[in-house]
Amino acid sequence: MTDITVDEIKSRVDRHWDAIVELLSRKVALAAVSAKGITGDHMRKSAEFVAEELRGLGVDTKVVQSTNPDGTPGAYEVVGSRIVDENAPTILLYAHHDVQPVPDASVWKTEPFTATVEADRLYGRGAADDGGGIAIHAGSLLALGEDLGVNVKVFFEGEEEMGSPSFIPFITAHREAFESDVIIVADSGNWSDRIPSLTTSLRGNTTVDVTVRVLGHPVHSGQFGGPVLDANTVAAMLISSMYDDDGSLKVPGLKSQEPVGGLQRDIDEETLRRDAAILPSWRLTGSDSLASRLWTKPSVSVIGFDAHPVEGSFNVLADSATFRLSLRTAPSQRPEEAQQALAAFLKKSAPFGAVVEVKPLENGMGWAMDPDSEAVQDAQKAMQEAFGVEPINKGEGGSIPFIPELQKLFPQAQVLVTGPEDPQSNAHSPNESISLYGLRRNVVAEALLMNALAR
Ligand code: BES
Ligand code: MN
């Protein structure tokens, strides 16, 4: 540990603050939407921008295009290192440079790809998820400057939002780029913009496409409606068969667990209602703590539904309907196992003998923190010093499936999941934003943590 004080780190972050915000703003402007093509030029430019910024911070980076499992070209990844002392610990800094799409810019209050500051929040697609992660890593390196006492490796991924399809071949081919003692994944977030958190767990994720068939072809709805239900109605029945009367999932074989490391604080309903913009009359579903329902119990959502659009619809019974389910799994359940349980339940529950096909799609494993690891103690102390309040650790309902893959390869590495988000960030939705108050302290916390790890 070098003898830089907490106040010195804070004043260095203040001094470099404009540069940190500028970096984040330029990153937002690159519109690195991986859903528009992982191998697109816009993704290469985003990777090159990040690589160049890090080079300016003394990290020897390069952009490497990964290879998909089927041999086709994959994502533009940024890898690199800054080695200060062979005997010092090595920290791997992770963030992703790809962002979610903007399906409808008209519902944004600001231009999605123009960083705009309002009331101490910076708005823009990817401002938090995960431009904020890039800003935290770059900012902490900037603050430590020549006083960096640990070796740093970086991996800034270009396809996280697409489920990291080429991640396993990439880590296998570039094993040494990931070898480290501590891995800081800055892709999650804090309890609030004022209260820092380590993320104690992430849920897994599995996706299936379900097709319901009832007729050989569409038929007149007046002539046949009554004894014959349309496929959309049957799909709705099938979807509702997954739930009890109180809205709890009742699919056998989906596991639940308690919040990891004990429940530090439950989520209060008023806050949840505000953060998720829940309509006043709309009641919450399920039972047990809200924290367990959000973090460690499974949930299913219909994320796509193919049916005739309302506009231009006519009086016909649909012969088939297809919908996509996204199942979030308990942190320690294998997603393959959960996927099979879900598929078996849907097939068995086919209403009135409808033909139900389930097409299995991607699986991503959840993750749970080791609450006793030494780096966890260091990180909590750094967060306390940076924010001036005790951290409240929390689980997350979202998924970062590469973490367990990385952990499998490097079982001795301690993984810390931090990040720029807070409940107002609207990641994946319109009007995404990052708290500048929170970002500044996240940068301080990471610099303090790296300094502590240098001992
Ligand atoms: N940053 C999120 C994960 C996250 C979400 C952390 C909410 C904390 C709170 C990440 O970029 C993400 O969205 N991951 C995907 C993974 C999926 C493609 C397998 C997700 O959770 O949908
Ligand atoms: Mn993310």
Image (cartoon, helix red, strand yellow):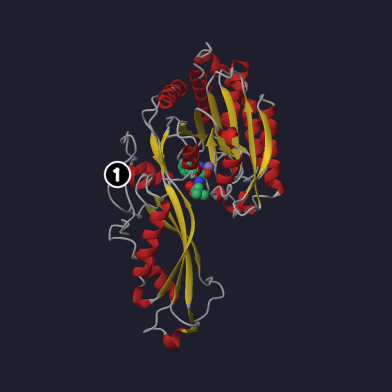
The structure residue drawn at horizontal position 51% and vertical position 13%, both measured from the top left corner, is 5
The front one of 12 and 315 is: 12
The structure residue drawn at horizontal position 34% and vertical position 40%, both measured from the top left corner, is 267
The image quarter containing residue 12 is: top right
Residue 410 visible in the snapshot: yes
Decide: few, some or many residues near mark 1? Use Cα within 10 Å; few <14, some 14-19, many ≥20: some
In the image, the residue with mark 1 has its CB under 8 Å from the nearest atom of ligand 1: no
Residue 215: x and y, percent?
A: 45, 81
The residue identified by callout 1 is 289
Q: Amino acid at mark 1?
A: Ser
- Whether residue 64 sits left or right of residue 443 in the image: it is right
Is 298 above or below relative to 155? below
Residue 350: x and y, percent?
A: 36, 72
The image quarter containing residue 200 is: top left
- Which residue of the protein is positioned furthest toward the top in this rendering? 3
The front one of 428 and 200 is: 200
The structure residue drawn at horizontal position 38% and vertical position 25%, both measured from the top left corner, is 390
Q: Secondary structure at mark 1?
A: loop
The image quarter containing residue 156 is: top right
Is 177 above or below relative to 287? above
Residue 188 visible in the snapshot: no
The structure residue drawn at horizontal position 34% and vertical position 38%, both measured from the top left corner, is 260
Is 259 above or below relative to 219? above
Residue 78: x and y, percent?
A: 64, 37
